[in-house]
Image: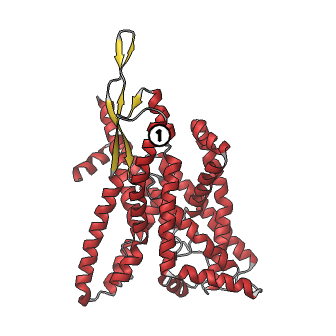
Amino acid sequence: MLQKITQIFKVKELRDKILFILGILVVFRLAANIPVPGVNVEQLRQFFENNQFFGLLNMFSGGGLRNISIVMLGVGPYITASIIMQLLTMIVPRLEQIYKEEGEAGRQKFNMWTRWITVPLAALQTFGMISLFRSQGIFGSLTSLELGTIILTATAGTVFLMWLGELITEKNIGNGVSIIIFAGIVASLPTAISQTLVVWDPAKVFTYLGYAVFAVLVIAAVVFITEGQRNIPVSYAKRVRGNRVYGGTSTHLPLRVNQAGVIPIIFAMSIMLFPGMIANFFVQASNPTVANVANSINNIFKNQWFYGLAYFILVVLFTYFYTAVTFDPKNISENLQKQGGYVPGIRPGPATAEYLHKVLNRITLTGSLFLGSIAVLPFVVQGLTNIQTLSIGGTGLLIVVSVVIEIMKQIESQMIMRDYEGF
């Protein structure tokens, strides 16, 4: 491993890219520690200790929400905008045509619209967060000017992080948004470890050891599922053109067990946030019926059993949804047929599409159940071990492992490409 790291830093182009990304992450972490004024720090700390949902939300914000910093929302609104655009792609045929048929120009249009949607979403989510924090005593009374300034600042912070993420993506070493979330998760580890050491109880030494062993097993399972794939054999018929024979080769079509990555978990988190935020708008309503309904919704989402079950179901559903968006068996079947390829024992055309759809559904079931289990893992572990400071955050763990694997693969591909250029 040390030898590979040495080789990477010997290549000037790769070294410059890595140092640039590290510099961007330093800027992000500095921004995540600049708080907005008027925050009751003690009340804020108690709020996050007693609310695990917002602890998870803080993870997706990159750690900025716990400090109510100028980048308190992180890249959350951008992710929500991406969800909306993906849903609209399935509903509006013209959008699907732009995204799939117009090539790079179509994708640039799609990304531009996503960025525009991010701005009002960020403003709306900031207002919802501030309203919630005011009801919890975290903020005192705010004038209209102060509230407007905080909303404008947090919205600008989200746009700033969106820009930083795109700068990282341009370097072709991982996805910028994923790396920003990854940096927020990793940055919280020293604090979590120090808190665990402060409340260390020698009587629980075997619990801690079991916890560590379980963590290693979970990491191994995450890597195994993330890298797992089903290879569909594909053969190409021989074709004669002039005096040359083409085709006659065999290859495979890889179908990943976790085709959707961490996107379903991020989608589910964004959806789970909305009911509570909307309910908080009406908690202080003058109409007692509206206020009671809002309080009931808040209490339902504070119930760990309901939250865990709803979270699990949403992750499973979004896994199927995102897989259907990104992998089209009919399109793959048509492309294979055009190139003279076929799956042995399966007729080309609709029969191949049906076969791919059937196989994909089976392996997606495994992937979706795994993702759902990973999503609710922290609740289960904390219930069994009663360790509140260090949590095997299944979602965070999955993001960290996925991002590290993606970065390693992209760096390795760039190293191999450089070797080819040398030859």
Residue 120 as seen in the image, left or right of residue 11: right
SS for dot 1:
helix
Query: In the figure, residue 87 lies in which quadrant?
Result: bottom right
Q: Is residue 62 visible?
A: no
The residue that label 1 is drawn on is 353
Determine the residue located farthest toward the right in the rendered image.
Answer: 286
Above or below, 248 against 57 in this view is: above
Query: In the figure, residue 145 lies in which quadrant?
Result: bottom right
Q: Nearer the viewer, residue 358 or 82?
A: 358
Above or below, 136 against 82 in this view is: below
Q: Nearer the viewer, residue 135 or 325?
A: 325
Snapshot colouring: secondary structure
**Where is residue 388 shown, x and y percent of the image?**
39, 82
Q: Is the residue marked by circle 1 packed among few (<14), some (14-19), or many (20+) residues within 10 Å?
A: some
**Where is residue 165 shown, x and y percent of the image?**
51, 54
**Where is residue 422 shown, x and y percent of the image?**
30, 31
Determine the residue located farthest toward the top in the rendered image.
Answer: 243
Residue 281 as seen in the image, left or right of residue 266: right
Q: Nearer the viewer, residue 74 or 153?
A: 74
Residue for point 67% across, 54% down:
116
Amino acid on which the number 1 mark rests in the picture: Ala
